[in-house]
């Protein structure tokens, strides 16, 4: 029995080309999947850091609510009058180079309330802790002072459903992924009972 060697060699060359094309398509798919996985890991890490830093601020305020500074009655009242500066991502020049704003704990000459706000500014105003990926990313903290209708506090927002004389509500906001993902945390920081 004679075998035609020309047909066999041509067939194996065609099989090799088809298998190379299939393997090439597989490698392209794997590289795309790897790129997506790296982006997902980065996004997940930034969200985890945002959750941690948001909870850090809440714990600092609640854990040190009796810290006073100046004429403030408590730490929440101090934060209502003196908003911490967390607007690092709003300045376009900050997105180019890493900027560490300095000592997280300050020195011994500042009071406790100022030391806490300096710590938050040092952490939030640095790319060493949380990156600024796009133009719509923001970090902000705001303190709300609510009062009952019988309270004499002029700077507070009146709310009939409050049973205390004053109530302080804190809000931490972090926008991630160029503003597409927003992390908010509202929490009661302190209260003043009716006299």
Image (cartoon, rainbow, N blue to C red):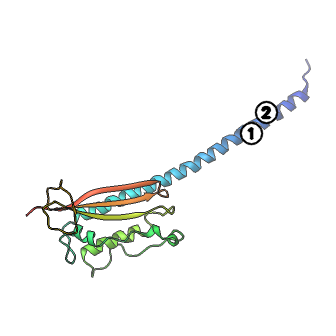
Q: Residue 126: in sight, yes or no?
A: no
Q: Which residue is mark 1?
A: 21
Query: Which of the 4 image quarters holds residue 81?
Result: bottom left
Q: Name, please, the residue furthest toward the left.
A: 195
Q: Nearer the viewer, residue 49 or 153?
A: 153
Q: Nearer the viewer, residue 147 or 82?
A: 147
Q: Which element type, helix, strand or loop, lies under badge 2? A: helix
Dot 2 or dot 1: first in sequence order is: 2
Q: Position of residue 95 (x, y in %)?
A: 52, 68
Would residue 30 be found to the left or right of residue 20 on screen? Answer: left
Q: Which element type, helix, strand or loop, lies under badge 1? A: helix
**How many numbered tags mark residues here?**
2
Would residue 107 be found to the left or right of residue 66 on screen? Answer: right
Query: In percent of the image, x 49 and y 58: which residue is there?
Result: 178
Q: Assign the N terminus to one quadrant of the image.
A: top right
Q: Where 109 sits versus 3, above or below?
A: below
Q: Position of residue 166 (x, y in %)?
A: 17, 62
Q: Where 10 sits versus 127, above or below?
A: above
CA distance separating discs 2 and 1: 10 Å
Q: Name, please, the residue furthest toward the top.
A: 1
Q: Which residue is mark 2?
A: 15
Looking at the rendered image, the disc whose residue lies closer to the viewer, 2 or 1, is 1
Query: In percent of the image, x 70 and y 40: which residue is there?
Result: 23
Query: Which of the 4 image quarters holds residue 116?
Result: bottom left
Q: Residues within 10 Å of mark 1 (few under 14, many from 20)?
A: few
Q: Residues within 10 Å of mark 2 (few under 14, many from 20)?
A: few
């Amino acid at each position: 029995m004679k075998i035609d060697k020309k047909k066999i060699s041509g067939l194996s060359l065609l099989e090799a080309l088809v298998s190379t094309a299939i393997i090439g398509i597989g490698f392209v798919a794997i590289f795309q999947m790897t790129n997506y996985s790296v982006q997902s890991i980065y996004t997940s890490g930034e969200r985890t850091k945002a959750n941690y830093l948001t909870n850090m601020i809440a714990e600092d305020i609640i854990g040190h609510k009796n810290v006073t500074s100046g004429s403030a009655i408590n730490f929440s009242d101090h934060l209502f009058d003196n908003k911490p500066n967390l607007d690092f991502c709003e300045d376009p020049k900050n997105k180019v180079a890493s900027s560490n704003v300095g000592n997280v704990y300050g020195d011994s000459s500042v009071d406790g309330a100022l030391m806490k706000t300096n710590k938050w500014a040092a952490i939030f105003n640095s790319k060493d802790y949380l990156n600024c990926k796009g133009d719509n990313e923001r970090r902000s903290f705001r303190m709300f002072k609510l009062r009952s209708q019988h309270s004499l506090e002029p700077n507070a927002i009146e709310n009939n459903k409050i049973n205390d004389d004053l109530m302080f509500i804190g809000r931490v906001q972090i926008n991630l992924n160029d503003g597409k993902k927003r992390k908010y945390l509202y929490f009661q920081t302190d209260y003043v009972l009716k006299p």
